[in-house]
């Protein structure tokens, strides 16, 4: 039986293949540790995207707390050539997606929500200090 990391990577690959506007998808811990991702990202790019995603989501959480607006459901950053989406995906985990500029935003967010529901049990993480770091099995993995 495949382990949960391989299953998670397969689901992320499936997302990028089914929705052409989604270029990359990764799962990360809330503190920015890349845990898995779709093919096509190098490990270095996955780690960079994880750090950016965790940081932007954390900033949004700070704004919600400071201004009494509650928790963050999703962070969307519009770039010149596309979008970065970050959403909570279980306790201490995030799902980040890079999409093309012509992506249908509603479809991307809908597909992300479906993916989070499908794999919620794979996406819960503990803070780094409380458990050993998982072996890397994400982007850059053997094909």
Image: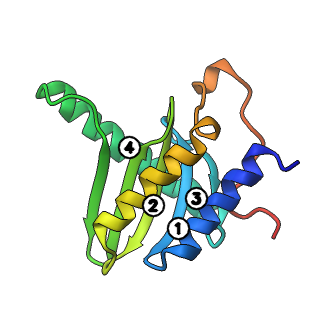
| Residue at mark 1 | 24
Q: Foreground mark, 3 or 2?
A: 2
Observer-nearest of 9 and 110: 110
Label 3 vs 4, first from the N-terminus: 3
Residue furthest out toward the right: 1
| Residue at mark 4 | 55
Task: Categorize mark 1 by other alpha carbons within 10 Å: few (<14), some (14-19), many (20+).
Answer: many
Q: Is residue 23 left or right of residue 140?
A: left
Task: Decide if residue 137 is in sight here.
Answer: no
| Residue at mark 3 | 46
Report helix, strand or loop for mark 2.
Answer: strand
Residue lying at 88% horizontally and 48% vertically, measured from the top left: 1
Decide: marks 1, 3 in contact (CB < 8 A)?
A: no
Q: Is residue 25 left or right of residue 132?
A: left
Q: Foreground mark, 2 or 4?
A: 2
- In the image, residue 133 sits, relative to residue 129, either above or below, namely below
* Residue 29 locus on image (x, y percent): 54, 38
- In the image, residue 135 sits, relative to residue 70, either above or below, namely below
Residue lying at 62% horizontally and 67% vertically, measured from the top left: 14
Residue furthest out toward the left: 67
Residue lying at 64% horizontally and 59% vertically, measured from the top left: 11
């Amino acid at each position: 039986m495949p382990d949960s990391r391989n299953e998670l990577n397969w689901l992320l690959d499936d997302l990028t293949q089914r929705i052409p506007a989604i270029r990359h998808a990764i799962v990360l811990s809330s503190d920015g540790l890349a845990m898995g991702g779709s093919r096509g990202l190098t490990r270095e790019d996955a780690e960079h995207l994880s750090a950016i995603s965790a940081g932007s989501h954390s900033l949004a959480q700070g704004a919600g707390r400071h201004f009494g607006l509650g928790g963050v459901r999703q962070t969307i950053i519009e770039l010149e050539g596309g979008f970065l989406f970050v959403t909570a995906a279980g306790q201490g985990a995030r799902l980040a997606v890079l999409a093309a500029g012509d992506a249908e935003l509603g479809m991307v967010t809908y597909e992300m929500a479906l993916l989070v529901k499908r794999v919620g049990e794979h996406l819960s993480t503990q803070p780094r200090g409380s458990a050993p770091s998982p072996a890397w099995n994400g982007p850059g993995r053997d094909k």
